[in-house]
Image (cartoon, rainbow, N blue to C red):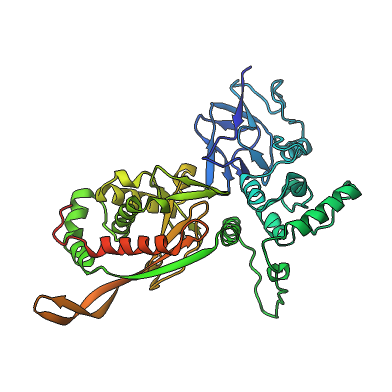
Amino acid sequence: MAQVELIMPKMGESVAEATIIKWLKKEGDKIAADETVLEIATDKVDSEIPSTAEGTLIKRLFNEGDVVQVGKAIAIISTDANATVETASPEVKAPAANQNSAKEVSASPAKEVASGKFYSPLVRNIAKEEGISMAELDSIEGTGANGRVTKNDILAYVPNKGKQTAKPAETAATQTQTQTSVKETPAPSSNGAAHQRPAIAVGAGDEVIEMDRMRKLIADHMVMSKHTSPHVTSFVEADVTNIVLWREKVKKNFEKREGEKLTFTPIFIEALVKAIKDFPMINVSLDGTKIIKRKNINIGMAAALPTGNLIVPVIKNADTLNLVGITKQVNDLASRARAGKLSPDDIQGGTYTISNVGSFGNVMGTPIINQPQVAIMAVGAIKKKPAVIETEHGDLIGIRHFMYLSHSYDHRVVDGSLGGQFVRRVADYLEQWDINREF
């Protein structure tokens, strides 16, 4: 009797684990090849896991809510038409006799550190950035599943790092060494009390709403970004009259010929790509003291979901696409984002992000950097304004279309000169738009 292990697949770079959200098949159910067996979630995106074989699901190795490493077996499928649920696989290394054994597997992921504990890439990266040793990381009490240290745990620990009470197993010498290191290397925050959560009183009639999983992840990522990068924001007002008039002139023929609606977003992205080519040090990431200059220009576009949450699908190699190609990518990613059909790869690998706050009627915003990038741009609503128009016959007053560009950047690696010149260059490309351009 042949048995097949259903493996937790790799779902993009830096994704090392996933949480089982819902089993769609019970033990004993017949399954067709490529039929969805369960739903999972990572810190990037939700996905469905299809069966790799036709047969019978004879064992689920993990429960809903369990965190499973990429590459681990999550279920056993028998390809024997007469298979029964009681059949066990002699080759499966993960305990599968009962629910308790499944939980034990979840609690014992691959040993990535000497202590045997598993830490997510994000937790390990924060520890590295903050100079937290592995021994110190092991001492943090985790609030995640099976005591795992979460992003919230390590971010809450950072302001007072080195001051926590040591675990009972630690020796007096270890405690003394920790206290000494704290004196020699002060924590970067000037006052740990400033990071204490305020006490919240719940009044009569107040409604307490628990964050959904995605909102918790967004909150964690935003706090981490502000903690990681000293943000500076530069603003430029751009005259986009030519773009507004050109789009109005060509949008019907564009849709008829290409089968795509032409929005302003692809035009903004094209200008961004040109400016990134002019200023490639905007297209970087920072790893400690090492600057990683990206070869590819991958533009993330922040998209609001029907739930009110936010996701950032990525246009890969945007510098190789013309305006039509960028438009097709923008519309496809936006459509699949709203339908919840993005794949993990769709939101991986961004090197620069744009956020259209103008779609909500906002004239400008101060966006938070999407780590590990070092810059992000917000584009505001386009508004008509009276303006001075310079001509060869003198100055005139006319009605023009203006918008604000807000450029937030990581001041560790992007200074005001580069950050300011970059947003000005984007505005220049928008203002110099050829109103007679062919598409």
Please tell me whether residue 291 is drawn above or below residue 5 in the rendered image: below
Which residue is most to the front? 184
Image coords of residue 361 (percent x, y): 38, 72
Residue appearing at x 43%, y 55% in the figure: 353
Asked if residue 201 can be seen in this view, the reply is: yes
Image coords of residue 228 (percent x, y): 58, 58
- Front position in the image: 365 or 28: 365
- Front position in the image: 64 or 361: 361
Image coords of residue 109 (percent x, y): 71, 37
Asked if residue 382 can be seen in this view, the reply is: no
- Front position in the image: 241 or 161: 161
Image coords of residue 245 (percent x, y): 19, 67
Q: Is residue 168 left or right of residue 428?
A: right
Residue appearing at x 77%, y 52% in the figure: 140
Residue appearing at x 45%, y 49% in the figure: 284
Give the quadrant of residue 119.
Answer: top right
Which residue is most to the left? 393
Which residue is most to the top? 1
Please tell me whether residue 132 is drawn above or below residue 5 in the rendered image: below
Please tell me whether residue 2 is drawn above or below residue 9 in the rendered image: above
Please tell me whether residue 305 is drawn above or below residue 190 in the rendered image: above
Q: How many marks?
A: 0
**In what quadrant of the picture does the N terminus appear?**
top right
Give the quadrant of residue 359.
Answer: bottom left
Q: Is residue 242 left or right of residue 119?
A: left
Residue appearing at x 20%, y 59% in the figure: 251
